[in-house]
Every structure is written in C-alpha cells, then in structure tokens.
Image (cartoon, coloured by chain):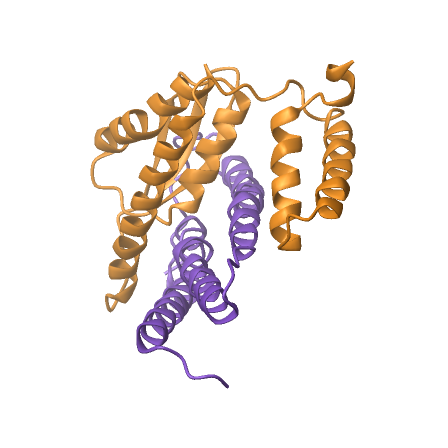
Chain colours: A orange, B purple
C-alpha cells in the first residue's frame, strides 16, 4: 500500500522540501499542499524513473558535495587565469575513461558535477562498454585526471549508491 | 533605505562583484575561445561559482535585513546546476556526432580533434 502511494520516497521528500523553501514557510497549510504535490509528482515520475533511489550511505553525499564545491572554486580560478591571458590557448583534449559506477543516479550526479566544474565537461556515456567521454579545458596529464576523478568522485559515489 | 552594517555591505558587494566578474569572464571566454569544445567550458563559470556567489550575496542580504532565514536562492542554484549539463550534453553530443560523421574513414573517429578555424 505504502509502495503504491509513495514509490519514490526520497524524491517526494526532496520535492516537499523544495516547496517549503520556495514558499519560505513551514506552516501546516504549506506542508499539506506541498506533500500533496510531492506525492502526485513522484507518482508521475514513476512512469519515467525505472527504480527508486537507494542511498546506502547518505552522509557521504555531504562529503562529496564539499569536495566538489572546493574543486569547482579551484577550477573557476584556473579557467579564469587562462581566459585572462592575452591569447587564451589552453591545451584542451578528450579523455576516455572506464567507470566502475553503473548506478544511473550515481552517473547523473557525476555528470552534473563534472559539467558544473568549468575545467571539464561530460560529453557522452556508453552504457554498453561503461566508457565516458570527457572534454578537459586544460589537459596536462591525462592519467592524473583519470586518477583524480576515480579517487575523488567515483569511489565516494560507489560507496553511496552500490 | 535602512542603514546597512559595514561588514554586510562589504560581504554582499564582494559576492555580487566577484560573481558578476566571473560570469562576465565566462561570457567573454565564450566569444574569444577558438572552437566549440573549448567554448562549452566558459559559460559554466557563470552557472557554478559566478551565479553561486551572486545568489549567496542575495541570501545573506535578505536574511540580515529582514531578520529571518532567506534561502530560496538555493533552489535557483540547484535547478541551474541540474539543468546546465542537460543542455550542454545535448549540444556537445550533437557536435561529437557531426564531427564523427565528417571525419569518418579519416583519422581517429572516437575523439575527433577540434576543428581549428583560426
């Protein structure tokens, strides 16, 4: 019964939270309306989401976002210094790397983080070979990039989702 | 206009200015860089740290002046961060596809070297 009404509890919870933050109020009426919208929206999402999100170690998400935030700040200044030069001419390049991560929510988060970082962009993912194509703005050492992504992001995402 | 405490004015203006500068640098980069794959990197400065700083300054300003927690800027940041990669990937994959078709039968088809238009 609970499964039928609430197939995606985490999604519904997040939607309710978003609703309350947008309304800037945690009054009873807002909670009621927000819960209704969250349940209806997560029911609608059931048609496109194959499986509910399962977080094995949700607290690690905080660590992941802290690391990513730090990297985004660093990357912003790195790209800025390249752009400020008279003739910006970074040594850009493509990286193909194999991922152990197969959980689609994990992959989505990794794609968002890598793309939000100005220095790197997630181009495409081949699910059959689990190989991702990444474009790097200022590519100095390909092996180092692969190692960094694996160590800083993928290992955490594996712990969280798989 | 009410009088603002000095620390708040400094923090808020620093956030707004630095955020706006980063966003502008990203836009200038979009225009100046030499090929498509490089250009997709520049605007993400505005959607990550540039926008983030402006939104943070806004949240801080309104939280202090109204005397209650104003954090709905976080929702803007969340939606921008989640939707940027979608557009970017759509554009990038279209370009990768086109480059692969154009380079078919020539050299390395998977990761085509960016076309130099200089």
Q: Nearer the viewer, residue A135 or A39?
A: A39
Q: Residue at x 21, y 36 (%)?
A: A141
Viewer-side residue, B15 vs A115: B15
In this view, the residue in front, B60 or A117, is: B60
At a point 32% along the width and 74% down the height, the residue shown is: B10
Residue drawn at the location 23% of the way across and 28% of the way down:
A143
Q: Tell me the quadrant of the picture where the C terminus of chain A can be found.
A: top left
* x and y percentages locating residue A132 in the rendered image: 43, 27
Looking at the image, residue B69 sits to the left or right of residue A80; the answer is: right
Quadrant assignment, res B98: top right
Side of A115 where A66 appears, left or right: left
Query: Does residue A83 appear to the left or right of B94 in the view shown?
Result: left
Residue B88, placed above or below residue B105? below
Q: Give x and y (percent) for residue A50.
A: 67, 19
Q: Is residue A26 above or below residue B67?
A: above
Vertical side of A134 occupied by A102: above or below: above
Q: Position of residue A158 (x, y in %)?
A: 40, 18
Residue at 30 percent of width and 62 percent of height: A83
Q: Nearer the viewer, residue A133 or B68?
A: B68
The residue positioned farthest toward the bottom in the image shown: B1
Residue A52 sits in quarter: top right
């Amino acid at each position: 019964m609970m499964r039928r009404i609430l197939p995606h509890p985490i999604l519904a919870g997040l939607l309710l939270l978003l609703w309350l933050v947008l309304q800037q109020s945690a009054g009873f009426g807002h909670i009621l309306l927000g819960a209704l919208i969250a349940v209806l929206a997560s029911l609608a999402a059931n048609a496109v989401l194959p499986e509910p999100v399962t977080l094995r170690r949700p607290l690690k998400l905080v660590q992941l976002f802290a690391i990513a935030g730090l990297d985004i700040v660093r990357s912003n200044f790195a790209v800025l210094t390249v752009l400020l030069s008279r003739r910006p001419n970074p040594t850009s390049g493509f990286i193909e790397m194999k991922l152990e991560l197969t959980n689609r929510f994990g992959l989505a988060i990794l794609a968002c983080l890598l793309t939000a970082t100005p220095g790197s962009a997630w181009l495409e993912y081949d699910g059959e070979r689990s190989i991702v194509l990444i474009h790097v703005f200022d590519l100095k050492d390909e092996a180092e990039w692969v190692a960094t992504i694996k160590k800083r992001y993928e290992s955490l995402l594996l712990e969280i989702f798989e | 206009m009410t009088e603002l405490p000095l620390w708040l004015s400094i923090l808020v203006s620093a956030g707004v200015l630095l955020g706006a500068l980063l966003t502008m640098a990203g836009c200038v980069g979009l225009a100046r860089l030499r090929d498509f794959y490089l250009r997709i990197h520049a605007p993400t400065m505005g959607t990550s740290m540039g926008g983030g700083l402006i939104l943070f300054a806004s949240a801080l300003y309104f939280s202090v002046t109204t005397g209650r927690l104003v954090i709905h800027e976080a929702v803007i940041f969340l939606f921008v961060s989640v939707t940027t990669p979608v557009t970017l990937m759509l554009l990038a994959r279209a370009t990768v596809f086109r480059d692969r078709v154009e380079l078919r039968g020539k050299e390395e088809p998977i990761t085509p070297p960016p076309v130099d238009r200089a």
